[in-house]
Amino acid sequence: MDFCEIRIVLEKIDIPSPAEEICGCGAAVDFFGIVRPLEGDRTISGIDYEAHPRMAESELRAIVSEAADQYELRACRLVHRVGFVPAGEISLFLRTVTSRREMAYTVNRALVEALKRRVPIWKHPVFEPSTAA
């Protein structure tokens, strides 16, 4: 893999230009995980993400390494925010770069699915107070 950045952050996620990751490839796919304003049918102000940062980063690196072998992943940038993330803000940014678009889409989805299954990051929705009278 030509480029790999994996980070767990407390601050808002800045989305960089893909110039650094492109490395002569033909496709880059960006995924944004955005906190929804509803959890089920209840309004939330946001989600409090809890993680074990070193374990989470280690598992993310393992997942990306496996994907690089399986999908010819040439570059990856994965940033997950922890702490309180308000509704409407980005909690996950993932950029995958491959030689062809179909592979970029496939590996992007595979990484998100593996992250959800394997990485020690837990979601705690913060519900708005009930306004029912």
Image (cartoon, grey):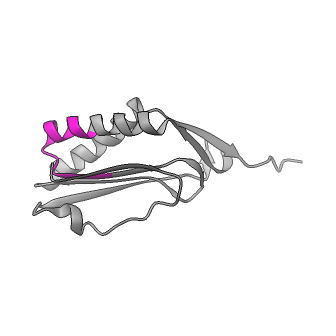
Residue bounds of the magenta highlight: 64-77
Q: Which residue corresponds to the image point at 82% horizontal and 50% vertical from the top-left? A: 131
Q: Which residue corresponds to the image point at 39% horizontal and 49% vertical from the top-left? A: 7
Residue 91 in percent (x, y) is at 49, 52
Q: Is residue 66 magenta?
A: yes
Q: Which residue corresponds to the image point at 16% horizontal and 55% vertical from the top-left? A: 101
Residue 75 in percent (x, y) is at 20, 53
Q: Which residue corresponds to the image point at 28% horizontal and 36% vertical from the top-left? A: 63
Q: Is residue 67 left or right of residue 59?
A: left
Q: Nearer the viewer, residue 69 or 36?
A: 69
Q: Is residue 5 magenta?
A: no
Q: Nearer the viewer, residue 101 or 77?
A: 77
The image quarter in which residue 107 lies: top left
Pick out the residue farthest to the top. Answer: 118
Pick out the residue farthest to the front. Answer: 54
Q: Is residue 89 above or below residue 118?
A: below
The image quarter in which residue 49 lies: top right
Q: Is residue 37 left or right of residue 95?
A: right
Q: Is residue 42 left or right of residue 24?
A: right
Q: Is residue 58 above or below residue 37?
A: above
Residue 115 in percent (x, y) is at 38, 37
